[in-house]
Amino acid sequence: MDPILKERLFGLTGSEGNHGEDVKEYYYYLDATPTHSYLKGLYKYPQRPFPYRDLVETNQSRGKHDPEYELIDTGAFADDRYFDVLVEYVKVGPTDILIHIGATNRGPDAAKLEVLPTLWFRNTWSWGRDDRRPELRAVALPGAGYALVHAQHPVLEDYWLSCSAEPELLFTNNETNLERLWGVPNPGPFVKDGIGAAIVDMAPHTVNPNATGTKVAARYTLEIGPQATCSIFLRISSERGEDPFADCDRIFDWRRAEADTFYASLSGPSRSKDEANVQRQALAGLIWSKQYFNFDVSEWLDGDPSGPTPPEARQNGRNARWRHHRSADVISMPDKWEYPWYAAWDLAFHTMAFGLVDAEFAKEQLLLLTNERYIHPSGQLPAYEWAFSDVNPPVHILAARALVMMEMARGERADREFLSRIFHKLLLNFTWWVNRKDPSDRNLFEGGFLGLDNISVIDRSMQLPEDLTLQQADGTAWMSTFCLGMVWAALVLAEDAPVYADLATTFFEHYMSIGDALNGFSEGASGLWDEEDGFYYDAIQRSDGERRPLKVRSLVGLLPIVSAISLDDTQAKRLARTVPVVIGTMTDHLGRHPERAPMMQSRLTEDGSEIRMLTLVPEERLRRVLTRIFDPDEFLGEYGIRAISRYHLEHPYELDARGQHLTVQYEPAESTTGMFGGNSNWRGPIWFPMNFMVVQGLRNLGCYYGQTFQIEYPTGSGTLMALSEIADDLAQRLVSIFLRDESGRRPVFGGVGVMQHDPNWRDHLLFYEYFHGDNGAGIGASHQTGWTALVANLIESQGPFRGSTD
């Protein structure tokens, strides 16, 4: 038996010997429909005592160059002595949910298992704001064949929890054990860990003999034979039924079949069974990871009425300038363990994946971030709970565009109401960027680490001395991409409201100015392009004019290629009411600024029609950057684009600054640097969101260039390919991380043999935070389904909508 009854999954942080926060248990999101009408998850529970101390001590004894010590390494699952605990939820109706728990003994001998499905009320009564207390109470039903709990709440309607097979019901209160934690008296005899004490410590006095409280567990003690399965059924409903489990088999079969039908329509006949499985589990994890998030910053800053006064430092600490922020919403989270809070740029990528199955929820999520309860009056979007004022990349117009483009690809009319709402809110955010992140008014932007935590030789979120300014190639490229997204949105909206044509022109002017600054087209401008290396770099600018590029070959210098958008004759005709005016303005602009001509190109296609493109990177420079990207000795890995060039493995970039010797070296897995809290891993691994952006950027460029632009791919191979073909190959490299290869191995599982070959493990997938730059193994937070769910979009893009991101 385990020494504790966990309230949440067990994991370690960097200070406990891990390379970053990571859960040390195995659970899988196997299925989910977007309405949550059907959910299926799997948890693997060792029959041996859980090795908490071994995991902590062994990880603490290892260095940063050693692999992490995982639960599978402890021997906890040796001889298959574990349980597979399968959980299914089905909605009978909006307030009626059936639950099935199936526990299978995978071991060679019979084994005992305690299963404790638990219901509790969130503690809202202990903080001095609302002392109304809800109640859970057992209902006596002699001979009924099931146990029943009545749940009463002062705001919610009554609910009834039915538990099959008449389990023992253990009641306590969902209140902190103050005596155990801080040595002060508890408010009553029954506290939240009372159920654990009753079972683990065999202390029956810790649960309420009167069968009432605010937390209850149904105790099932099972003896399960080898390879056998025991099932438990529960039902929580706003209606008290006479026979709650009478029709449950038919309902489960109905919802399972419904889920199969839904995903069959998504995957289509061109998908392999393995691809369909990867796509389905990626989307399931995204759906499972929605969370209710409740955070009132003013209340947190001022403290609870019944609690001690917060320290004075809190009033000037993190989030102090975000008193307006008040969230009480269901939000898509990166995952439920390491990141049980939203992150602004993660969420934008989540919505692109959600667009495949639930476009309305995706749109609501983007609008939520720009809601007045979230966005700062200055126009800044909140980054994440622990530091709203951090700066995340401005990718939200790209996400909005992706959602609308999906609709248009399906033959639907663009959702102009959504596009208009998000456009006007992002006007505020764009203004914040221009006013706050371009202090020298040169159209070369800062922004801090911009999500790429330790990708540079310096901590880019650090405050630099007053005489220094960091000019960021990625920050500038993101702002150019922001402009192009707003140009596109304004053109679409101008079909119905010509006034938007003026805004399209405004953002075009911004785009041209930013591109000029980045490339150094104007006389006397230095830009961030390095002619010798054929690459874009960050630079540090001194107030006296001296400037130093930071020559780290990284994703920072690749991002400019993403900033491209094409417009063909078909689209021009659709926008005929406004495009001629806008194009006339664009042409006039180039007449006044001929040096910027490489950023607006046009050509005639084979059928004589005209296609135009706005691009941040002129063709000659594009070829030079792509030559590096597609070089296997630099960025191109077997499984995607590395965050930092492999060139730096043998040629570290070094910088001596103010008495410090700083260096960047290619590291394909976890980074060994302590920068940004030691939980930063952008020095070589493969990250899905940035790879996704590169793939989309190549597709956008390919829409313009077609077969007229061919480049060696991979560099040095002698094979010439068009950009759209290269985008498809890159997408397949990324998808192949999760697919079985010719030998039956999935790169994502690395060298973990049981996950590669055991039929009870090999098809259950983990969607990691990032991936080894050389072998594709999953690294970092193991359940970072969030933006890694973009694998579902990459699988989808190989189907009928390929090349539709024009």
Image (spheres, rainbow, N blue to C red):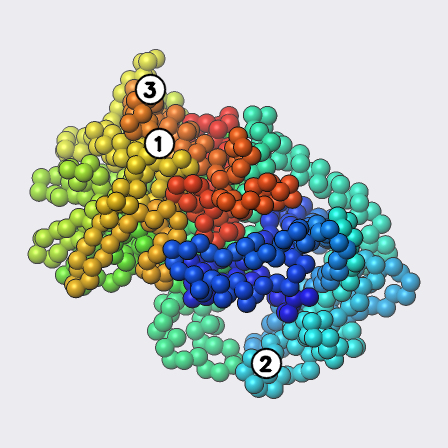
Residue 396: percent from the left, percent from the top? 40, 46
Q: Quadrant of the C terminus?
A: top left
Residue of label 2 = 180
Badge nearest the viewer, 2 or 1: 2
Which mark is drawn over residue 698?
1
Q: Please report the residue visible at 50 percent of the width from the left and 65 percent of the height from the top.
A: 56
Taking the view exactly as shown, the residue that stands out farthest to the top is 607
Q: Quadrant of residue 66?
A: bottom left
Of residues 469 and 574, the one nearer the viewer is 469
Instruction: Tell me the crowding category of disc 1: few under 14, some 14 to 19, or many 20 or more residues within 10 angstroms, Cα based.
Output: many
Tell me the kind of residue under disc 1.
Leu
Tell me the kind of residue under disc 3.
Gln
Badge nearest the viewer, 2 or 3: 2
Marks 2 and 1, the one that precedes in the sequence = 2
Q: Please report the residue visible at 8 percent of the width from the left and 42 percent of the height from the top.
A: 524
Q: Please report the residue visible at 53 percent of the width from the left and 37 percent of the height from the top.
A: 745
Residue of label 3 = 707
